Amino acid sequence: MTSGNKTTGLVEGLPSSMTGYESDSTQLETENKSICGYLRQDIRGSMFTELQLVILTFCTGMQDATTFPDYHCFASNQTGNTVFLCLALILPQLNGEMFFTPNIGMALGLFLGAGWLTGQLSHIIGPRKRWWLILCNLVQSSFVLGAAAIQYQYGIKSQGPQALAVIGLLAFAAGSQVVQSRSLSMTEISTAMATAAWVDLMIDQKLFVLKNRPRTRRIAFLLALVVGTLVGAAIYREVGSATAIVVSGAGKLLVTMLYFFSPAEKAKKEKSPA
């Protein structure tokens, strides 16, 4: 009894600042764990994530509206780049008239490289991890804004190191971006290539059914791509391509922030042993 009273007395005799410090540190540790746990959550497919992919599609349209007239290649539409590259192999005299072969090679190569790198790392990390999607979009946004900074600094040059740098940054960002629709199991909103979406829309057996989520996603994707291209072309005509790319980068930054609020997968309840 005496020792118990002494222990109680010692605890009670501790300074209030020390006990308060212990309480604050415990609370801070709990908050840190909850933040880390939140960032490690898996994002699930929802209307909110669909909206994010549609915004990215809009940004892609703006980029391609500027890269083709400036550099005679696409940053994200690799169907066109593949055809141009094949033409360059058979008809090299077209280089400099219809396209610039180094630009085509840079765009296609870095697009594929970014897709490979992002996809393989996603297999290891987890393709839907919140922190991973935030990081990927932040890097992509930085690359897009970096491309705009090069244009502001050096102007528009169709060939040369500056042109290759701009194309490389935009193509790498686009290649990494396209992986997201696969990661979120929303292949109807690829954020870049429109051919498959057009075909899938036309052959959809339930095209005119009121409730058809895949059809609705494809229409939203195609509209966003068309509107983004029109807006990008208008900005290109009135202000310049650098401004259009900045607006595109700002849109990607918005999506980066929205991933903090994207709904997560519901935790699976473990079955109690019988």
Image: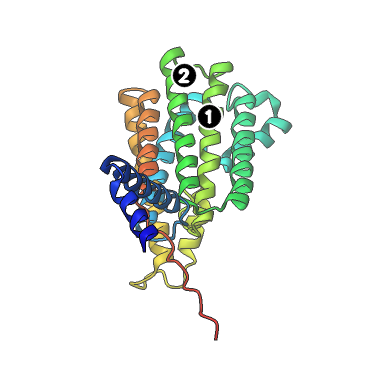
Spatial CA distance of label 1 from label 2 is 10 Å
In percent of width and height, residue 208 lies at 37, 70
- Residue at (46%, 19%) from the top-left corner? 150
Front one among 167 and 85 = 167
Front one among 238 and 115 = 115
Residue 270 sits above or below residue 16 on the image: below
Callout 2: 10 Å neighbours few (<14), some, many (20+)? some
- Residue at (54%, 17%) from the top-left corner? 162
- Residue at (48%, 30%) from the top-left corner? 143
Residue 99 sits above or below residue 192 on the image: above
Callout 1: 10 Å neighbours few (<14), some, many (20+)? many
Residue type (three-letter) at the residue carrying disc 2:
Ile
In percent of width and height, residue 56 lies at 41, 44
Cβ atoms under marks 1 and 2 closer than 8 Å:
yes
Farthest-out residue, bottom: 274
Q: Which mark is residue 51?
A: none
Which residue is the site of mark 2? Answer: 150
Which residue is the site of mark 1? Answer: 169
